[in-house]
Image: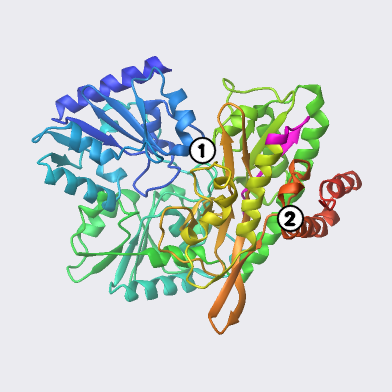
Amino acid sequence: MAKKNLEYLQRLRDAMKSNGIDAVVISGTDPHQSELPPQHWRGREWLTGFWSENGTNGTAVVTLDKALCWTDSRYFIQASQQLQGTGFSMMKEDGPDAVDLIDWLVENLEPGQTVGIDGMTFSVAYAQRLQQELDDNNIRFNDNFPQFDYIYPDRPERPKNKLFIHDESIVGETVDSKMNRILTEVKAELANAALISALDDIAWATNLRTAGDIAFSPIFVAYLYISENLKTLFIDKDKITDEVASHLNKYNIEIRPYDSVTDFVAALPKDTRLLIDPEKTARGVYDHIGCTPVFGGAGIARLKSVKNNSMLSNLATAMEKDGVALTKFFMMVEKEYPSGKLTEVELGKRLRELRLADPACVDESFAPIIGWNAHGAIVHYEATDETDVAIEGDGLLLVDSGGQYTYGTTDITRTIALGNPTSQQKHDFTLVLKGHIALSTIKFPAGTRGAQLDVLARQFLWNDGKAYYHGTGHGVGFFINCHEGPQSIRLNENPVALEPGMITSNEPGLYIEGEYGIRCENLVVTEPWRTTPFGQFLQFKNMTLFPFDISLCDTSLMTDDEINWLNEYHAEVRRRLLPLLSQEEQEWMNEKTKPIEK
């Protein structure tokens, strides 16, 4: 495969020479800034060989004599392995040895040279920052270099999957209601129209979904324009069924071809103040806008992030279904593990089958991360036929997985011991669990941001001279994306406050390269706690229903409050799941959730 990547790299350099490009910056996303774009836009992965089914965060830079790929700490191990022999070298996006990509360009190019990008795959915000830095150093900028049009002849087509309606009795809100709330946000930002590019926002606003456009996420490729007098969905028409056409007509949403969006924004009346999100809108679309653009739009993502009572009630059902599937899965693992015949790839297949056995589960919410021992230390490890290993001997098995249920999206990580765990493994697991509990139990005033809480999950590891570098929590969608903004819990500052109804993951971890990985993840929803003379206070409520491995708990490191929290959580797991389990499964669950003590 690496030989092919060298061939692709040469094709690109030939195209660069033909177009007067000295350096090209290659995005890993699509015109909608999707975290996991459709195959049509996954050219950076095709070019570099740094790839996974779940997608990989990375941006490539190619000059006539260098080829580099930037990625974050979740992928350092994976990227360094996959890039070998491809002509590309890995660059660190974060951590102590991080190098800023734009700074590298400025330092390595001469005045008068030209940097090219495909403006349709970079956000307005990123392209403007890049252009400003280049301009300041007399380096030319070309945002119309669609490199894969030149070098990728067998590029996959845009997806053509049919849409379907997400039951509004589950959603708990009509499209009209959502449109009215969006328009209120538009007016609040002193605009009179909006162009929505983010695919998850569009799926939420229209109560429509599809299967297959984007792996593991039921969203679809489109743009959505909204004003008081006109609502337009830009989409390939062969994706529209008669039922979906009637649904759109009911809400006065017209259909136009996907590719016509640039001509549409170019022809908007001059008095239109068009709200766009500069982090989600493509520079290539922005370049065509003929009216006044208004930067903003974060309020629309916030509307989506706050789940109503109907959603939360249905998500509770999804969590119960997920808990049943996971019970069957981990029972199977324990039963068959002694045979030595289980492998990481086989476990992924079995877990998928168990989840999709429930008719309400449409797909997994991402490709499962199933890592045995050393593979568990690769944060976003994805087992393949080439990397697959047998589950044998003593060690830790890390399983990060989730389901896309019509009742909601799940995401859970459990780390379990098979055989005899070491005292160090128990020590490390307990530190991670203590961080998970600390974040689960915190009470905080309204207006608190995730960055203000993040250290709670890291403190016990830091006090032991250990750390992890990924975020502690990401927002989660409702039968949309597993990763959803705008809220997060991470060290990086994010101005978005946590609000009641927001669903967020709680997933501290620890990764000992070459040995094992540990992660403890539940989904939590922010909810009111109480109001005091100092204002309203909030708390997290756990939504996920499955036990932590008590055999890995070193209770000498745990406080009485932490032990009580774990016992109470396991009691809730029993209360909710036991009525849904067989007799044998109930006995297993009772054993896995029995109270622990010092």
Label drawn at residue 320: 2
Look at label 1 and name its amino acid: Asn
Q: Which of marks 1 and 2 is nearer the N terminus?
A: 1
Q: Name the residue rendered at 44%, 45% in the picture.
A: 35
In the picture provided, is 144 more to the left or to the right than 560?
left
Closer to us: 477 or 260: 477
Q: Where is residue 371 in the image (x, y as percent from the top left)?
A: 63, 32
Q: How crowded is mark 1: few (under 14 residues within 10 Å), some or many (20 or more)?
A: some
In contact (CB < 8 Å): disc 1 and disc 2: no
Name the secondary structure under disc 1: loop
Residue at the outermost top position: 3
Report if residue 187 is visible in the image. yes
Is residue 169 something that shows in the picture?
A: no
Q: Position of residue 428 (x, y in %)?
A: 65, 40
**Which stretch is magenta?**
405-424
Relative vertical location of residue 69 with respect to residue 168 in this rendering, above or below: above
- Please report the residue visible at 79 percent of the width from the left and 56 percent of the height from the top: 567
Residue at image mark 1: 54
**Secondary structure of residue under mark 2:** helix
Q: Residue 87, how many percent across, how many down? A: 33, 20
Image quarter of the N terminus: top left
Residue 510 marker: none
Residue 593 sits inside the magenta stretch: no
In the image, residue 192 above or below residue 378: below
Q: Where is residue 315 in the image (x, y as percent from the top left)?
A: 65, 60
Q: Quadrant of residue 575?
A: bottom right
